[in-house]
Image (spheres, helix red, strand yellow):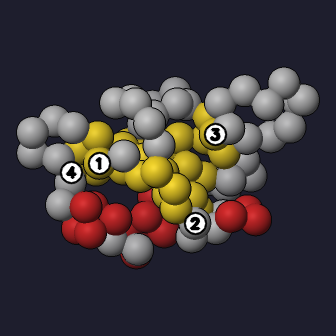
Amino acid sequence: MRALFVGGVVDNSEMDMEGSQPPVHYPEDTGGGHSRYRLHQIGKTSDGNVAYAVYGAPDMADEEVARIADERAYARRFEAEPSEFTH
């Protein structure tokens, strides 16, 4: 699964993630009270596997993250169906 980042200092960055389900925040637990990137969208392939997870910077609105993810065509790139992650 690929983690895709929108906004902040790592905007437009990607990384591989282990596991079948993405964590709600990245990094998962800093322990230092720092703001973390928040999961906004999950893209699943036709067989139900998670292909990608879109994380937005702490100060970004949900609508802005969704707009940028659509603009960057993550769903098409990974041949997956996007769905909004609800917290």
How many numbered dots are placed on residues in this image? 4
Report the residue at 9% width, 45% height from top.
46
Describe the element under mark 1 as helix, strand or loop: strand
Q: Is residue 73 above or below residue 23?
A: below
Return the residue at label 3.
26
Return the residue at label 4.
81
Q: Position of residue 80 (x, y in %)?
A: 20, 54
Describe the element under mark 4 as helix, strand or loop: strand
Return the residue at label 1.
51
Tag 1: Cα neighbours inside 10 Å, few (<14), some, or many (≥20)?
many
Q: Amino acid at mark 1?
A: Ala
Q: Tell me, yes or no, whether the two marked residues, 4 and 1, touch with CB atoms within 8 Å.
A: no
- Numbered mark located on residue 13 in the image: 2
Tag 3: Cα neighbours inside 10 Å, few (<14), some, or many (≥20)?
some
Q: Tell me, yes or no, whether the two marked residues, 3 and 2, touch with CB atoms within 8 Å.
A: no
Tag 4: Cα neighbours inside 10 Å, few (<14), some, or many (≥20)?
some
